[in-house]
Image (cartoon, rainbow, N blue to C red):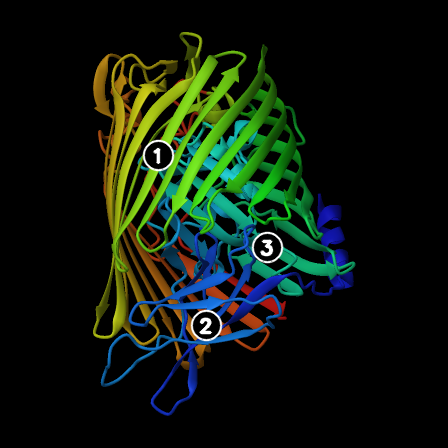
Amino acid sequence: MKKYINLFIILIIVMVNNVFAQQFVEGNVYELDKKGEEIGLPGVNVYWLGTTLGSATNIDGYFKLNFPDNNNRSLIISYIGFKKDTVHIADNFKNPLKIILSSSQQLEEVVVAERAMGTHISRIKPIATQIITTAELCKAACCNLAESFETNASVDVSYSDAVSGTKQIKMLGLAGKYSQLMTENIPNFKGLATTYGLDYVPGPWMESIQISKGTASVKNGYESITGQINIEFFKPENSDPFFFNAYTNDLGKLEANAYTTIKLSEKVQTLLLLHGEDLSTKKDKNGDGFMEHPMKEQFNIFNRWKYTGKNVHIIAGFKILGEERNGGQMSYDDSKPRNTLNGYGMGSKSNRFEMFTKTAFIFNNKKSNIAFINSFIYHDQKSFYGLNDYKGRENNYYGNLMFQTYFDKESKHQITSGLSYMVDNFDETLNDSTFVRKESVPGGFVEYTYVDPEKFSLILGARTDFHNIYGTLFTPRIHLKYNFSENTILRGSAGRGFRTPNIIAENIYLLAGSRKMNILEEPTMEEAWNFGLNLTQYFKVFDKNLSINLDFYRTEFVNQIVIDRDRNSSNVYIYNLDGKSYSNSLQIESKYELFNRFDLLVAFRYNDVKMTINDELKQKPLVGKFKGLINMSYATNLNKWQFDLTTQLNGKSRLPNTSSNPAEYQLREESPAFTVMNVQITKFFRKWEIYGGVENLTNYTQDNPILAADDPFGEYFDSSLIWGPITGRKFYAGIRYRIKK
């Protein structure tokens, strides 16, 4: 593994770059102060009329947009407190544009914010979409996708067990497997990647993360039930020529990331991204004999290409990943035979290869296009947990052929139709048992979109898929958006979702214990309906922007796989739902610039999640009843320093029943509420950034995260009952260097 890390260092040193320019529009949005000087406006909404293609200006008022597929060249510029402007882009225009907005009212004094908030709700998209930008990701260490939601109230991240270091997300109070994970609108990180997939996306590679709750577009398949998380990586056409990031913490972790753009011709450009990390120290701060975190080595390479022709655009890329992690008791020696005398050990080796292509043909009328998406994934995993052995191999292919057209002059009415095909081959071995499954799912869909950015938008879609195991799946979905005014936006959604359960791969954390896994019946396809409302209100308060976002979502399961850990503390019973199962999630979130360059985010979420377990409707275990979040971010004048503080308040959760255990191995009925604080300080230079911080500032940890840690091969050993932090206070530091365009 270390030879790959050394290879990274060599590649980083020899990187060369150039910048590719494509057909796009870019510019700056300004306002004039009392002296008539131009001041950049951050957070201005810039979008193409009649489309959902848009962006927001950065701290300097800069924006950059690709041209839409249709002939529409009208650019809308909208910002609270200023008159909306429309700019028509002529064929012979020259970049960059300079746009000056006029105030919508006469004020005695105009105060201009000097930076945009890192997270915002898109005003344009019919589906309520929260966009986490690079600026937000840099408020915390953000080594990978699992650490990207520390300042976000919608997504929870926690450990699934105290041995393997596996992390899982929750949205709307339900496990991350019910949220569709996408990489640039291609389904990803399911199946075998469910276990460690959140660690497979380096934080410095991500340009943004888009979070939408509830059902998603039918174009992306039938799997979104509670929401969708789409990751956008940096792209060769708009990335800095060179970027490098190095990180370390007091646990002994070392990490390096880099990317560079390379121009091969006026039509072809590429981006190479590299990642390497090493954690080879053992820590046992709570003295239970187990490592707090597994030792880990990972290398990750991503190379993407783009070809831009007159009517043909092609995007292609591949990723190669190798990871090895080892954990367990401090006394475990992996050079000796695995047995009870050697102690409890855990090990996992994963190799993963991904390849994708996106090809788009744009008709001469610019109103229609055909796109063809292909993705292939190979994943191989070999692991052991104590005396349990697990091996898995997965081959996945995904293809999506889409035709899109506008059929009116104003480009308000759009039809998208297409055919898709997914095949997923599983080959798993657990101890002496082998599980083989092949999914083959052809399908088709049609989606109608009406977009009037000023008032009303509608997405009405349906798809039918023909599953070789579970039969015909019909998936209807609807999304509505209504603007009561420029500053009051209401959205609604409803739809159906399905997903194939992967019993072993999605519950590997159960192997890190002594519970016997009992599958009582053949698992069936999981199915649920989701209904949601979202209200976003913008205000001007003391000449500062205040936004309030309120949403409510309900998920009702028709069928669900029940992981029953209540019936008997020595066993896990797995069966299909027989009764009710639902989730209600209510969240309110507010953002305000309290004073110049001081951003404040306050959020609160209440969860009501219940499931029929062993014929009794009860609260789902290990789901917090509520979550509070406060994030404060302050930047000094000219953005030389930035200070970020995040406080999370986590509510009580029901714990699985352990009353049949001996008294010393019994847990209380509920976990306590607890608070976690993270702080970071960043110093900016012209090309450099130096950052450092502390995670879990108050050093709060869960008591006895491993049940019966003194007897890891006994019948009461269980490391999967995790409700709080298992790693105490952590200090970290890093450096970022970039060559800007």
Sequence-earlier tag: 3 or 2: 2
Neighbor class of circle 2 (other Cα within 10 Å; few <14, some 14-19, many 20+) is many
Q: CA distance from mark 3 to mark 2?
A: 20 Å
Q: Is residue 192 above or below residue 299?
A: above
- Residue, x 22% and y 85% (percent of image)? 108
Say which residue label 3 marks.
234
Q: Position of residue 291 (x, y in %)?
A: 49, 40
Say which residue label 2 marks.
61
Query: 674 or 147, which is in the foreground?
Result: 147
The amino acid at mark 2 is: Gly
The amino acid at mark 3 is: Phe
Question: Which disc is residue 478 wearing?
Answer: 1
For the N terminus, which image quadrant? Answer: top right
Element type at marker 3? loop
Q: Is residue 342 above or below residue 64?
A: above
Element type at marker 1? strand
Q: Please, which residue is most extreme toward the bottom here?
A: 35
Question: Which disc is residue 735 wearing?
Answer: none
Q: Position of residue 18 (x, y in %)?
A: 73, 65
Q: Nearer the viewer, mark 2 or mark 1?
A: 1
